[in-house]
Amino acid sequence: MTPSAISILIVDNERPHADIVALALARVGYTTEIAESGEEAVSKIESGHFDVIFTDLIMEGIDGFGVLQSARQNLPDASVIIMTGHGSVPSAVSAMQQGAFNYLLKPLDLKQLRAVAEKAAESAFLKRANQELQTRLDEKFGFEKLVGSSPEMLAIIEKLRRIAPTNATVLIQGATGTGKELVAQAIHQNSPRKNEPFVGLNCAALSENILESELFGHVKGAFTDATSDRIGKFEYANGGTLFLDEVGDMPMPTQIKLLRVLEENEITRVGANAPIKVNVRLLSATNRDLKSEIEKGHFRSDLYHRLKVVSVRLPSLAERTGDIPVLIDYFIRFFAKKHEKTIRGMSAAARKYLLAYDYPGNVRQLRNMIESMVVVDYDELLNVDDLPEELDDLVSEEDRQQAILLTQNISHTLREPEASGVATNAEANPQRDPIEALVGHSLEDLEARFIAATLAHTNGNREEAAKLLGISERTLYRKIKP
């Protein structure tokens, strides 16, 4: 944190005093602004941003209490310091009880002024950093990350908006790869518990003893490897949200203990006798048909109904194919940023095959495919040659060969001039007519470069490229065919 990044408002109807405070703070690097009345201060607070506010307490019209109230309403992260005379100390203390950060007695000690300013600035900076972190979390796990504009997804997002603010248990059902954990994180992040822990546990492939220890914790000596006490996920998530993935795979004895926890809001560590109260919102998910599992005797009916106070079913990607183009574009942007690569777009041919695939692995599979394409690409255009092997059987030989040729041409066009010790025409005289820079190249070479650049501009769309070139699509195909 640097002082120059902190904006301070000084409010005092005695201008000379305000000037002294502003000068003392400006000399150590703070950005300062003065308001000569409470009314002016409120106007500035409502229209601007300040991290720290120093305000006189006794002023005509809107006094320091009014400035404090306005700051709390409009700039809740700002630190407000009250400046007051000796006779107004009780009022200053009252102001602190109403949310003021500190108070200073007049006449001011400039050393103390700067010390209080530093602490107030640090507090404001931490609040701002926390808010920025919270914003990033909202961006990562908020509903806007549930990408899709299909009627199915819009209905789900609207349902999540209604249930997130509650404490209801939620059962999220859907095939593998549909985004069940992402939905659970979005529910938590948009709930009153969002500042408390979100703890996840996959119930699959865990034995009964290990799963119970993970859920409820254990005490030293409870079993052979229990060399010390250990808290479980319920205790760790206390006050927050516990997400149980693949809850349909939970062993029957553990189901009974989980039901008791939901009924009594308390857990007992493995090997202990004393119960421990917990306050946890439970979200669970499964790719199994729990009604069918109940009929088979593999899942308890009473637990099922406790888990599904509200149920959310996520459709497969095959049920929401209208979202595939949106997901493709979203994942391209996401992974281009993640892997620090420049991706100008995707060819029409590559997009065609991605839209034709049935995605047994759902959104997760599409996500992994796009990441793979971004990682292996080297010509800034995602094309048929970048498609993952799952789509090999779909790609025609004609599209495959055209993609190879297009890649070669684009690479040739984008390639830096080879080091020869001799500057090109453009390098020798940057003010020269750019047409002259083409001198020395054959017409055939220039045509190939121009066609490649046009195809890159249209993301490989031959029909659009042919229109821009003023030739037929058949002629274009003949020119680029090897």
Image (tube, rainbow, N blue to C red):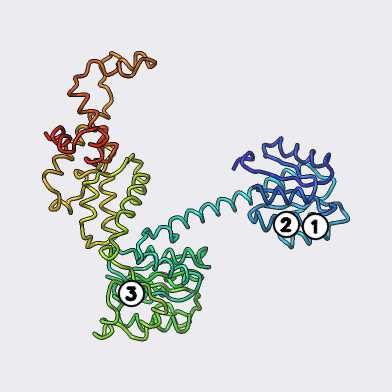
For badge 1, the amino acid type reads Ala
Q: CA distance from mark 3 to mark 1?
A: 56 Å
Residue ID for mark 1: 92
Report the number of numbered marks.
Answer: 3
Q: Earlier in the sequence, mark 3 or mark 1?
A: 1
Q: Is residue 456 left or right of residue 240?
A: left
The N terminus, quarter of image: top right
Q: Is residue 265 left or right of residue 421?
A: right
Residue ID for mark 3: 247
Q: CA distance from mark 1 to mark 2?
A: 9 Å
User: Which residue occupies the foreground of this view, 436 or 88?
Assistant: 436
The C terminus, quarter of image: top left
Could you tell me residue 95's position as x and y percent? 77, 59
Residue ID for mark 2: 100
Quarter of the rendering containing residue 382: top left
* 429 vs 5: above or below: above
SS label for mark 3: helix
User: Which residue occupies the foreground of this view, 373 or 282?
Assistant: 373
For badge 3, the amino acid type reads Val
* 283 vs 468: above or below: below
SS label for mark 2: loop
